């Protein structure tokens, strides 16, 4: 339902991206939220409203949410709160999107409690907020709900668009 709302909001035609979810989840040693998989399959990686980078790919170097495990990158600053970056088989956050304002959108996952993935968002000032909703509902609220604070961007009047990342067309 929420994935469909995002498709309608952006006017995006689903792209039918193929992802080997069994291999991805084996690498992470934790199942990913089903609606995130549908988002990835419909959108792939790219940018919403010219402001939100969605890491909806499992290959390549652009918009790839697996990149931190495939190539060590710097994690979110440790002084940003009580959460640690996820390590396969452990407990922590997995970042699936970010904004041009420095906001990070993640899940809080625990390999010992598979299937439980609340959305965890870190704002510009380093504050963390936890949301008990699906990835696609959270993303829709960020993009379209003017009252969704402190993470909503609808109040900025940005065009409701989605732009696929480089290589999304096979190039």
Image (tube, rainbow, N blue to C red):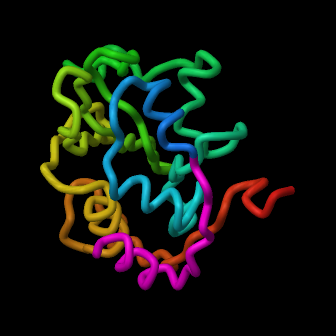
Which image quarter: residue 69?
top right
Name the residue rendered at 42%, 82% in the picture.
9
Q: If the image is split into quadrants, where does the N terminus sit?
A: bottom left
Lateral position of residue 37 relative to residue 150, left or right: right
Give the extent of the magenta segment.
1-19
Does residue 154 sit above or below 64 in this rendering? below
Which image quarter: residue 168?
bottom right
In this rendered view, identify the residue nearer to me: 2 or 54. 2
Q: Position of residue 8 (x, y in %)?
A: 43, 85
Residue positioned most to the front: 22
Q: Position of residue 20 (x, y in %)?
A: 56, 44
In this rendered view, identify the residue nearer to me: 41 or 9. 41
In this rendered view, identify the residue nearer to me: 26 or 28. 26
Q: Position of residue 44 (x, y in %)?
A: 58, 58
Residue positioned most to the right: 171
Lateral position of residue 98 relative to residue 150, left or right: right
């Amino acid at each position: 339902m929420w994935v469909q709302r995002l498709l309608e909001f952006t006017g995006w035609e689903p792209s039918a991206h193929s992802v080997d979810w069994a291999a991805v989840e084996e690498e992470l040693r934790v199942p990913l939220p089903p609606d995130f998989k549908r988002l990835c399959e419909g959108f792939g990686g790219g940018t919403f409203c010219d402001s939100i980078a969605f890491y909806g790919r499992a290959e390549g170097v652009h918009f790839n949410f697996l990149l931190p495990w495939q190539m060590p990158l710097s994690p979110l600053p440790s002084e940003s709160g009580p959460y640690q970056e996820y390590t396969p088989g452990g407990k922590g956050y997995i970042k699936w999107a970010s904004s041009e304002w420095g906001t990070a959108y993640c899940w809080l996952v625990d390999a010992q409690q598979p299937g439980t993935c609340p959305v965890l968002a870190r704002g510009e000032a380093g504050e963390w907020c936890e949301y008990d909703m699906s990835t696609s509902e959270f993303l829709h609220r960020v993009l379209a709900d003017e009252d969704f604070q402190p993470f909503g961007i609808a109040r900025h009047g940005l065009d409701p668009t989605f732009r696929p990342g480089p290589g999304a067309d096979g190039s």
